[in-house]
Amino acid sequence: MCQVLQNASHELNTPLTVIKTSIDVLRLNKNASKTDYEEVLALIDNEVNKLSKISDKLLEITNKKTRE
């Protein structure tokens, strides 16, 4: 179970890092266009979808372990 938690932590950290970095870059770019914002929002949306899938998998694993 410890290995599962380590893997999950890593899998969660990657999308979170992408989201945080994207937001930081956009904040620093005072000349960002509407297109820039739309691209960053699409990227963030994609990463949030990844996080949702990871969360669903963790819940599934937890439910299986609870039933055992």
Image (cartoon, grey):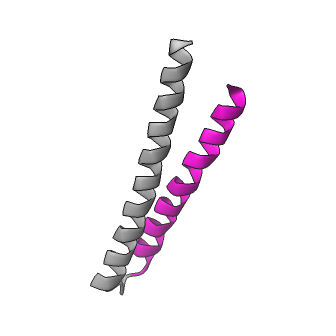
Residue at (54, 28) in percent of width and height: 61
x and y percentages locating residue 16 in the rendered image: 51, 54
Residue 29 image-quadrant placement: bottom left
Identity of the residue furthest to the left in this view: 34
Residue 28 vertical position relative to residue 24 in the rendered view, above or below:
below
Horizontal arrangement in the rendering, residue 26 relative to residue 62 (left or right): left
Horizontal arrangement in the rendering, residue 30 relative to residue 12 (left or right): left
Identity of the residue furthest to the right in this view: 3
Residue 41 vertical position relative to residue 55 in the rendered view, above or below:
below
Residue 28 image-quadrant placement: bottom left
Quarter the C terminus occupies: top right
Residue at (56, 19) in percent of width and height: 65
x and y percentages locating residue 43 in the rendered image: 42, 68
Q: Which residues are magenta?
A: 1-29
Residue at (51, 65) in percent of width and height: 21
x and y percentages locating residue 31 in the rendered image: 36, 87
Residue 16 vertical position relative to residue 62 in the rendered view, above or below:
below
- Between 60 and 54, the one lying in front of the other is 60
Number of numbered markers: 0
Identity of the residue furthest to the top in this view: 68
Horizontal arrangement in the rendering, residue 34 relative to residue 14 (left or right): left
x and y percentages locating residue 6 in the rendered image: 68, 37
For the stretch drawn in magenta, the main secondary structure is helix
Quarter the N terminus occupies: top right
- Between 68 and 23, the one lying in front of the other is 68
Residue 24 part of the magenta segment: yes
Residue at (45, 59) in percent of width and height: 47
